[in-house]
Amino acid sequence: MRNRGVVVKFMSNALIVEDINTKERIRCVLRGRFRLSDLKPVVGDIVEYVRVHDTGVVESIIKRKNELPKPKIANVDQVVCVYTLRRPEVPLLILDKLLALVEEANLSALIVLNKIDLLTEEDEHRKRLFLETYSKLYPVVMTSAKTKQGIDQLVEHFKDKTSVFAGPSGVGKSSLLNVICPGANLRTQEVSEKLERGRHTTTAAELLHLPFGGLVADTPGFSLIEVNHIRPDKLKYYFKEIREHGNCLFKDCNHIDEPGCRIKELVEEGVIAKSRYENYLEIFKEVTGR
């Protein structure tokens, strides 16, 4: 008899599936035909499997409602993009690339500005600019796993949703999860004083149950985000403010050097943040191979 379950963890040669009805977690292997196919299960997939003694064999994958390519996960409601201004100081380009991938997947984004307990008076200007830029586009929550600031607000965003944490190494994703999901006991690692970056402590994406309802995936950190698959003429739709204001002289305007570009005017007027537009140009160069 076929059963249905959710892939909660994927390993090199097996996966852990949580049965939808019994909530039992079963170690499963894939049918041989999956090795010959480009389609393989990812965390968040709903699969059909059969029991074989104490293990299971995955027979098929139910059609996904969505899929995030980086980190690789399916059937999620929102992506929680974790960012820090200090230890480590993360380039805004990384955040904007991640947000573009979220928009490409047609998912909701929540931005978490973490480690605010480390910010000094010298950081106030950067923090204010960050909030002015991104709070107009997405919900932003300022948090500290150490002082617990913003945790209650974060919990409200997580209730009864399937969420995925995403962000570079060292921004405190696992530390935040340990606070909002007591008992998770996820490994954490201090950021290197010398290198100003974190070490990878999460080695594979895994779905965790939240005590107040919902699921959340902790995912491995990263230093690079691949966007080369994005078509240059589609990139403008993955920047929310450009998509909403892109009523230029020419309908196919990519907002680079075309005449009558309304987006460039809005950047000059301060309606669209200069940093966001500059990062749009940088990503456009990357996806066109310029």
Image (cartoon, rainbow, N blue to C red):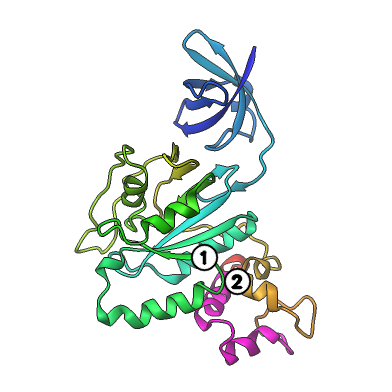
Depth check: 238 or 80 in front?
80
Q: Can residue 236 be seen in this view?
A: yes
- Residue 139 numbered mark, or none: 1
Whether 124 is among the magenta residues is no
Q: Is residue 47 above or below residue 76?
A: above
Q: Provide the secondary structure element on which disc 2 rests.
A: helix
Residue at the (56%, 17%) spot, across then down: 57
The quadrant of the rendering that contains the N terminus is top right
Image: 231 above or below 74 = below
Quarter holding residue 154: bottom left
Q: Which of 15 and 147 is in front in this view?
A: 147
Q: Please report whichever mark, 2 or 1, sits nearer to the chain's N-terminal start.
A: 1
The residue labelled by disc 2 is: 284
Question: How many labels, in total?
Answer: 2
* Residue 144 position within the rendered picture, expressed as x and y whole percent measured from the top left: 31, 60
Q: Position of residue 52 (x, y in %)?
A: 53, 10
Q: Residue furthest top?
A: 53
Identity of the residue drawn at 51% across and 72% down? 135
